[in-house]
């Protein structure tokens, strides 16, 4: 009986101390949890601000977006949260480019929109100064209005599946010979609004070639640059500095040569001077307006055409 009385007195005496200790431990754990939550929320808010700053850049389709601040707190600090987990704030990876750096330092599909077979890189920030490394099996590349300066032999060497390339509005002044030599499936090539002074050999299956608004002169365009393109339909060479009309394949339907420095045409330019019965049914539209040539001086140069070229006649 005496022993029971002693145990009762001890339990009554120690109970407040146990409860106090438990409450203290609970308060410490709650404080730690709140501090860690604050770290998480601050980090997520910082990342959200960075994402908003670069919202104009599209992320690759299929890559999950990070949850927002509230979702992140629920996800990482939910009911199953382990109090032993320490969540440390993190900065950008060490190898991430500084703001205003070159886009070539980042993976293509973080800068561009990558769909199945298509890559869209338009007005990329940070600046894109070279053709990006493309995913395998890319068929369509749209890299318009960037600051690409040069096309090398390596840029498209491994992407033989390309069918369309659009590089409108860049700063391209040089294309290495053979840069397109392996693109046996390429059908459309758009190099408008660049700074080209010469053209390389073009792929044989092109149906549309656009080099409007460049700095091309006749000496920069090889005599057979278009002659062997037997499937070419649309040829756009307006707003350049060409002095003569290049050889145009029989397959061409539309040719634009407006606003150049063309001073004359001959009976061989569009027709065959030694064959008065020759008719050219495919060539439906020829633009020569904005050139010094006076077309009325060459009446026999258009007898094979269904319609007269657009240009200066008087």
Image: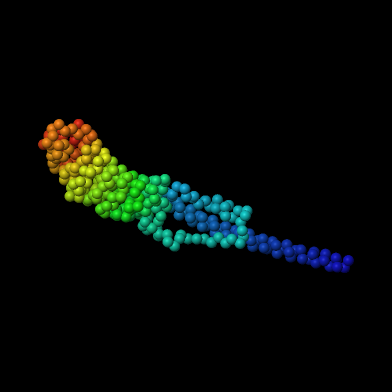
Whether residue 71 is visible: yes
Kindly identify the residue that appears in the image at 39 percent across and 51 percent down.
135
Q: 154 and 209: which one is in front?
A: 154
- From the viewer's perspective, is 80 left or right of 98? right
Residue at the (50%, 52%) spot, across then down:
66
**Left or right, residue 68 beside residue 16:** left
Image location of residue 89, percent across then percent down:
52, 61
Relative to 22, does residue 108 appear above or below in the rendering? Answer: above
Q: Residue 256: where, in percent of width, then height? A: 23, 40
Quarter of the image where the C terminus is located: top left
- The answer to which of 54 and 298 lies nearer the viewer is 298
Q: Nearer the viewer, residue 30 or 156?
A: 156
Q: Quadrant of residue 99?
A: bottom left
Q: Which residue lies at the image location 32% right of the left edge and 45% below the top edge? A: 185
Q: Position of residue 80 (x, y in %)?
A: 62, 55
Please identify the quadrant where the N terminus is shown.
bottom right
Tell me, yes or no, if residue 258 can be seen here.
no
């Amino acid at each position: 009986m005496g022993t029971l009385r002693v145990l009762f007195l001890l339990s009554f005496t120690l109970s407040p101390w146990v409860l106090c200790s438990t409450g203290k431990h609970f308060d410490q754990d709650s404080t730690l949890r709140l501090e860690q939550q604050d770290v998480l929320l601050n980090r997520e808010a910082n990342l959200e601000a960075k994402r908003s700053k670069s919202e104009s850049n599209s992320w690759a389709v299929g890559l999950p977006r990070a949850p927002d601040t509230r979702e992140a707190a629920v996800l990482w600090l939910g009911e199953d949260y382990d109090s032993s987990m320490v969540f440390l704030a993190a900065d950008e990876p060490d190898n991430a480019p500084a703001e205003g750096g070159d886009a070539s330092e980042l993976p293509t599909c973080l800068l561009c929109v990558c769909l199945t077979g298509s890559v869209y890189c338009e007005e990329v920030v940070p600046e894109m100064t070279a053709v990006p490394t493309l995913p395998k099996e890319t068929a369509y590349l749209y890299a318009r209005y960037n600051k690409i300066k040069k096309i090398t032999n390596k840029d498209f060497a491994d992407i033989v599946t390309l069918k369309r390339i659009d590089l409108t509005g860049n700063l391209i002044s040089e294309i290495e010979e053979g840069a397109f030599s392996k693109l046996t499936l390429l059908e459309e090539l758009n190099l408008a609004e660049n700074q080209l002074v010469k053209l390389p050999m073009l792929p044989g299956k092109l149906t549309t070639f656009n080099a409007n608004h460049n700095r091309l002169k006749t000496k920069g365009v090889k005599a057979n640059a278009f002659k062997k393109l037997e499937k070419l339909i649309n040829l756009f060479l307006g707003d350049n500095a060409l002095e003569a009309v290049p050889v145009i394949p029989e397959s061409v339907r539309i040719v634009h040569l407006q606003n150049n420095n063309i001073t004359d045409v001959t009976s061989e330019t569009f027709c065959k001077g030694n064959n008065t019965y020759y008719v050219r049914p495919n060539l439906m539209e020829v633009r020569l307006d904005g050139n010094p040539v006076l077309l009325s001086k060459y009446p026999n140069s258009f007898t094979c055409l269904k319609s007269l070229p657009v240009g200066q006649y008087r």
